Image (cartoon, rainbow, N blue to C red):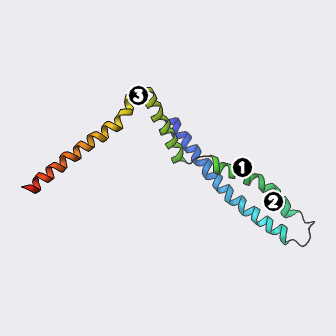
């Protein structure tokens, strides 16, 4: 169980890191593109070097942001997987939601009858 929470923490850290690098590298690409378009001398390589250096960082951070789940999503996925494996191992577990709804329905009917009988008296 500890491994799941540890992996959730790692996913959260990677996701946050991806977001931070995405914002920083996106801003750097934007500034370097402005520098490239505003440069009067097209032989000036400084903005182009920045653009070439930052683009791979931007792409990697974009992929991290898209494909690494947040901690909440990771824990929900692991919980869903655990529930699926329990239902596969024990088919009687599938009956629990239906039985619960039947029990709840009977309780509501009984309480409604009590209220009706009190109102009639």
- Which residue occupies 54% across, 40% down? 6
Tell me if 121 is positioned left or right of 76 in this view. Answer: left
Q: Which residue lies furthest to the left in this view?
A: 121
Residue 60: which numbered mark, if any? Answer: 1
5 or 42, nearer to the observer: 42
- Residue on which the image places disc 2: 51
What is the CA distance from the residue labelled 1 to the residue labelled 2? 14 Å
Among the two numbered marks 1 and 2 on one chain, the one whose residue lies closer to the N terminus: 2
- Residue on which the image places disc 3: 91
What is the CA distance from the residue labelled 3 to the residue labelled 1? 43 Å
Dot 3, how many residues are within 10 Å of its Cα: few (below 14), some (14-19), or many (20+)?
few
Image x and y of residue 88, in percent: 46, 29
Mark nearest the camera among 3 and 1 is: 3
Badge 2 element: helix
Mark nearest the camera among 3 and 2 is: 3
Badge 1 element: helix
- Which residue occupies 62% across, 47% down? 14
Residue 8's quadrant in the figure? top right
């Amino acid at each position: 169980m500890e491994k799941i929470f540890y992996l959730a923490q790692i996913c959260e850290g990677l996701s946050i890191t991806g977001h931070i690098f995405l914002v920083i590298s996106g801003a750097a690409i934007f500034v370097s593109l402005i520098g490239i378009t505003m440069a009067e001398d097209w032989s000036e390589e400084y903005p182009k070097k920045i653009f070439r250096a930052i683009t791979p960082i931007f792409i990697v951070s974009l992929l991290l942001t898209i494909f690494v789940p947040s901690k909440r999503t990771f824990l929900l996925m692991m919980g869903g997987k655990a529930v699926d494996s329990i239902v596969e191992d024990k088919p009687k577990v599938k009956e629990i939601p239906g039985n619960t709804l039947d029990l709840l329905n009977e309780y509501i009917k009984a309480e409604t009858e009590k209220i009706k009988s009190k109102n009639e008296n």
